[in-house]
Amino acid sequence: MPADRPLAPDPTSRASITTTVALYALLWVVSSFNPIATFRSALAQQRALVAQHHTDRPYPWTIWFDLLDFALGFGWTMLLPIAWGVARTYSDRSLRSLIIVALGLPILVAMTGLLQSETSRVWNFMLPLVLLPAAIELSHWPRAARAVAYLAMLILMLAIGHNMVFMLP
């Protein structure tokens, strides 16, 4: 990890955040879509699923399996860039705090048992935070190395998707 590169905010990150906020605002204005109400509805549905399947996945066993499911959901190939991104940003106090929150949130959610089971689907709202250190790290990689990482993620996603078993009613 070269220390001579500054950790200034990437213009692409600003554009991504601005675009996401703008799209949600446009969606809200055009169709009255309410992301907060959607989240509340998903939380209510999740509570119903946990109540229905509480004997299949008892707490605290869900902690490990939920974190593992979440890691599989975001493509576990990103674990190494996440670790390197954490190491790269450790000396930057503001980024260090953000990274602690980003990685601490899924651990806190798993330990509290707030959103048990179906984590690769339900925990999607935490993906941008968790992948932040990976994005910081990948932005410093050469284009060919990034392409290999993205290709590995694609292959992994296709393999997992092909082998998924869905619960039937």
Image (cartoon, helix red, strand yellow):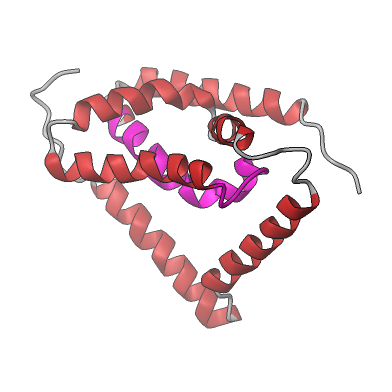
Left or right of residue 41: residue 2: left
Quadrant of the rendered structure where residue 21 is?
A: bottom left
Q: Main secondary structure of the magenta part?
A: helix
Q: Relative to 52, is 42 above or below?
A: below
In the picture as drawn, the residue positioned furthest to the left comes out as: 4
Q: Relative to 151, is 9 above or below?
A: below
Q: Quadrant of the N terminus?
A: top left
The verdict on residue 134 being magenta is yes
Q: x, y percentage for residue 22?
A: 41, 68
Left or right of residue 2: residue 17: right
Left or right of residue 118: residue 100: left
Q: x, y percentage for residue 83?
A: 34, 24
Quadrant of the rendered structure where residue 35 is?
A: bottom right
- Magenta region: which residues? 113-137
Which residue appears at 50% of the width and 52% of the height?
Answer: 125
Total marks placed? 0
Q: Which residue is at the front of the view, 163 or 57? A: 57
Left or right of residue 149: residue 60: right
The verdict on residue 131 being magenta is yes
Q: x, y percentage for residue 87?
A: 23, 25
Q: Which residue is at the front of the view, 99 or 142? A: 99
Which residue appears at 33% of the width and 28% of the height?
Answer: 138
Q: Relative to 26, is 152 above or below?
A: above
Which residue appears at 62% of the width and 61% of the height?
Answer: 43
In the picture as drawn, the residue positioned furthest to the right comes out as: 169
Which residue appears at 20% of the width and 32% of the height?
Answer: 89
